[in-house]
Amino acid sequence: MTGIKFGRLTALEIDDNRGSANQIKWKCECECGNLVSTLAQSLLNESTASCECYHSEIVSSRNGADLHNWKGGDVILSCEECGDAYAVSVSRKNSSRFCSHKCHGKWQSRTNVGDKNPSWNPDLTDRERRIGRKFPGYKNGELACMSEIITLANIASPKSQKD
């Protein structure tokens, strides 16, 4: 095996030290220059391919979600309303869309207008919508005939005259 390359390791000679079960070990030189002693079987079945420098390079090149054992942390997303970047936990990355309540409110004000609003009632006219909001029973969900609403609206907002 002398001179044979296994991954980044080149076999140099049989090591005088043996493995725990009297297994043969080889002294090898890694591409990075380190000398390492490893089991012959590990070289042959490709379970050892470097002096750990390769593993260190892989780990240092990964960050956050790229790591196989990453447990969480923040992910950077872009706000749908203002476009600012914001951090959010991994568990919320698929459900978070806005960087703040303010941006969410702006988006709702812009998108939930008129017939796009979930509470839109297509049976009401624009006039009924304007007057209905002034009627005292409007917030309680009480229904009244439109003539009563119009009468109450006229009483509630009489034209003011200056003396």
Image: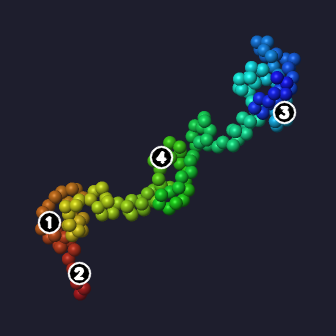
Dot 3 corresponds to which residue? 34
Q: Residues within 10 Å of mark 2 (few under 14, many from 20)?
A: few
x and y, in percent, of residue 139 in the image: 24, 58
Asked if the residue under mark 3 is in contact with the one under mark 1, i.e. CB atoms within 8 Å, the reply is no
Q: Please name whichever residue, 152 or 131, is drawn nearer the observer in this view of the structure.
A: 131
In what quadrant of the picture does the C terminus appear?
bottom left
x and y, in percent, of residue 88 in the image: 53, 48
Q: Earlier in the sequence, mark 1 or mark 3?
A: 3
Quadrant of the rendered image containing residue 129: bottom left
Between tags 3 and 2, which lies in front?
A: 3
Q: Earlier in the sequence, mark 2 or mark 1?
A: 1
Find the distance from the CA under tag 1 to the CA under tag 3.
90 Å
Dot 4 corresponds to which residue? 94
Dot 1 corresponds to which residue? 146
Q: Secondary structure at mark 2?
A: loop
x and y, in percent, of residue 138 in the image: 22, 60
Q: Residues within 10 Å of mark 3 (few under 14, many from 20)?
A: few
Find the distance from the CA under tag 4 to the CA under tag 2.
55 Å
Quadrant of the rendered image containing residue 155: bottom left
Three-letter amino acid code at disc 4? Answer: Asn
Q: Is residue 162 above or below residue 26?
A: below
Three-letter amino acid code at disc 3? Answer: Asn
Q: In this view, which residue lies farthest toward the bottom?
A: 163
Q: Residues within 10 Å of mark 1 (few under 14, many from 20)?
A: few
Q: Is residue 16 above or below residue 7?
A: above
Between tags 2 and 1, which lies in front?
A: 1
Q: Secondary structure at mark 4?
A: loop
Q: Describe residue 118's horizontal placement relative to residue 52 as left or right.
A: left
Q: Which mark is residue 160?
A: 2
